[in-house]
Image (cartoon, rainbow, N blue to C red):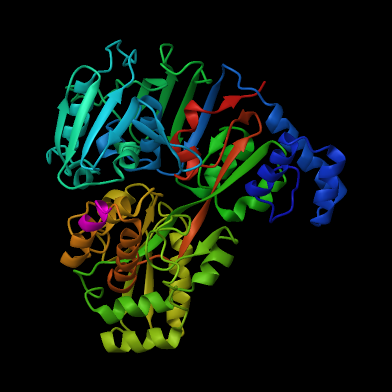
Amino acid sequence: MTDRVPSNWTNKHDRMVEDALRRGASRRELLQMLLAGGIGATVGGTLIGRASRVLAAEPKHGGSLRAAGWSSSTADTLDPAKAQLSTDYVRICSIYNRLTYLNGNSEIEMELAESVESDDAKTWAVKLRSGVTFHDGKPLTAADVVYSFNRHKDDAVGSQVASMAKQMSEITAEDKLNVRIVLSEPNADLPILMSLHHFQIIADGTTDFSTANGTGPFMVEEFEPGVRSILVRNPNYWKENRPYLDSFEFFGIADDSARLNALMSGDVQYVGSLSPRATRLLDSNPQVETLSSTAGNYTNLNMRLDMAPGNDPDFVTGMKYLLNREQTVKSVRRGLGIVANDQPVPPSNRYYNDELKPKPFDPERARHHFDRAGVLGKKITLTASDAANASIDMAVLLQQAGSEIGMNFEVNRVPADGYWSNYWLKDPIHFGNINPRPTPDILFSLLYKSDAPWNESSYQSEKFDRMLIEARGMLDETKRTEIYHEMQRMIAEDAGTAIPAWLSELDGYNTRVRGVEPHPFGNFMGYAFAERVWLDS
């Protein structure tokens, strides 16, 4: 966000100017277009210059980059099955490859797979690329895919996607490069599911993750959980000319101000999840640019339905009416967000239920429900942390709103370090921070199915579980959409999760870093930036 562009200028506008240049528009024609849109001549000239630089940029090889995420832990891992934090995702996306890849246009591309095909959405044929090798020189074979996928089904592994992998009832190597996958029930989304970070392919028989052996663009030189990772370019990477960087160092800086200062000072060249409050300061630094992505991630308030006070439906309903969603977007997020309706499927998804309206901010109605729940005047603790983006501000908003209707909310602000291990999923009322997922099936399976690994409010519904299975294999798009709409309604009304807004994520990077683009998985180009960016001279 350099060059003091207007505060409402977005990447969409940048792309509009770039597209016009690609179509052959002259500088004069572009200036006239920008002037008609209320952009002054000086700023318009700056924007055209910036777009011209983007188009003129050619990838360059070489150099080392330092980048910082917003979360890390002593439980950091190189095991794709167990990845949980942003630092984990960046590492595994750099070390390994998936069979398929979801690109910036939300389209599935083949990666380690040359093709993924099925006639009935139940039996799938996967053909692998030939000539791909792991970092240790071992050729990629069908046995590696069979081992990688079967491993997720082993309860002893503790895979984050175990519930999704268990639908793969048979995974068979037909020969060295062909795999046959039979699902317990049809699932038309399997190629998308394979693009999830956790389904990276590891070598057959791998059990030691103190280091990593992948087919990806970078190899591990140093890995200190909770401290840092240093990854170096894989000289034998199967993608021609990739990656561009010789190496990169990655670590977590949980504190928002510290992360911003590291970028502003030049100590790091790329950071994720900047606070919206930082935009004015970033505008003043010509060495820094930003990328805003509205990808469907959110910070949510979780009330466990199996603990007091969330075990009383009136308390949960009252909290949903006490959330000031508009203020959350306008004040907490400085406009970088969209009001949400307490379910996880974002407006950009084709299955989004736009008839499901957000509950309005209605303190008196909230008070009515709190009174019925018998909690007025009683101390209620809300656990929040910098680890869950904007959660402390949201908790303070609730505390202020509650004080005006007789609710006594105490904000338990806990350290970011250890938040996901010690508080998330555990405290009766706590905040979560969920990264984007490409399909309703994945969101529901991870977060709302009765046995979901991240069932944040302990939501239990046999009807919901049956509908999830039914929709998964549904080839009738109209019927499938109806089911997903109803499931969103059930979550919004019955689950103990309140989702006030979809957050626009703000990444910041030095102007020397080129190739940065938005991605439907959000920050860090869907965590796969390292393979795609380069350093300008």
Count of numbered labels shown in the rendering: 0
Q: Tell me the residue at 31%/16% (across/down).
A: 134
Residue 374 visible in the current orientation: no
Q: Could you say which quadrant of the image residue 314 lies in?
A: bottom left
State the image coordinates of residue 286 (x, y, percent, origin top left).
Answer: 72, 39
Quarter containing the C terminus:
top right
Q: Is residue 26 left or right of residue 222?
A: right
Quarter containing the N terminus:
top right
Residue 337 visible in the current orientation: yes
Q: Main secondary structure of the magenta part?
A: helix
* Stretch in magenta: 469-474
Nearer to the camera, 418 or 444: 444
Q: Tell me the residue at 71%/27% (across/down).
A: 56
State the image coordinates of residue 513 (x, y, percent, origin top left).
Answer: 61, 30
Q: Tell me the residue at 72%/31% (across/down).
A: 53
Q: Could you say which quadrant of the image residue 448 lies in?
A: bottom left
Q: Is residue 487 magenta?
A: no
Q: Is residue 206 above or below residue 359?
A: above
Q: Is residue 52 left or right of residue 93?
A: right
Q: Is residue 225 above or below residue 422?
A: above
State the image coordinates of residue 396 (x, y, percent, origin top left).
Answer: 46, 69
State the image coordinates of residue 29 (x, y, percent, origin top left).
Answer: 84, 43
Nearer to the camera, 238 or 161: 238
